[in-house]
Image (cartoon, grey):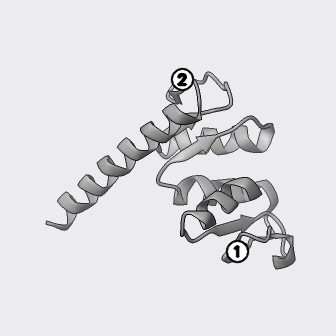
Amino acid sequence: MAAVARGVKSAGGTTIGILPGKDKADANDYIDIVLPTSIGYARNVIVACSADIIVALPGSHGTSSEISYGLVFKKPIIDLGHWNREGMIRVKDVSEAERKIQALIKDIQKEEHEKAD
């Protein structure tokens, strides 16, 4: 996750780390806002619910639970980890994922603008 946060920072973004433990020092150096939860894997509900778009990289049980919660919350989930689960957006590489994310962001912004009107 440090690589993702580093990329966000290099593009001028703000990073938020939702930590499973209670120690803020556990956050990587690229996190601007540290939110220790002290709830372990249960924090995956917060991660999935607060996301606009989820990008699933290769992982294990924690990533799998974030995917499951994302599907429950009807979040768009980009599959970059070969999860091959129904409801996910399958992409073949990072370039395709980036194009999909940009399109999803435009759709989300359009929906938010329509709700505001």
Tell me where residue 51 appears, x and y as whole percent: 52, 56
At label 2, the amino acid type is Glu
- Residue furthest front as drawn: 10
Quadrant into which the N terminus falls: bottom right
- Residue 6: image x %, image y %? 69, 61
Which quadrant would the C terminus be assigned to in this image?
bottom left
How busy is the neighbourhood of tag 1: few (under 14 within 10 Å), some, or many (20 plus)?
A: some
68 with respect to 111 (left or right):
right
**Mark 1 = which residue?**
35
The residues bearing labels 1 and 2 have C-alpha atoms spaced at a distance of: 31 Å
Q: Which quarter of the figure has residue 100?
A: top left
Residue 1 shows up from this direction: no
Q: Earlier in the sequence, mark 1 or mark 2?
A: 1
Q: Does residue 30 lie above or below 52 as drawn?
A: below
Decide: is 72 above or below 90. Answer: below
Determine which residue is flagged by label 2.
Answer: 86
| Dot 2 crowding, Cα within 10 Å, few <14, some 14–19, many 20+ | few
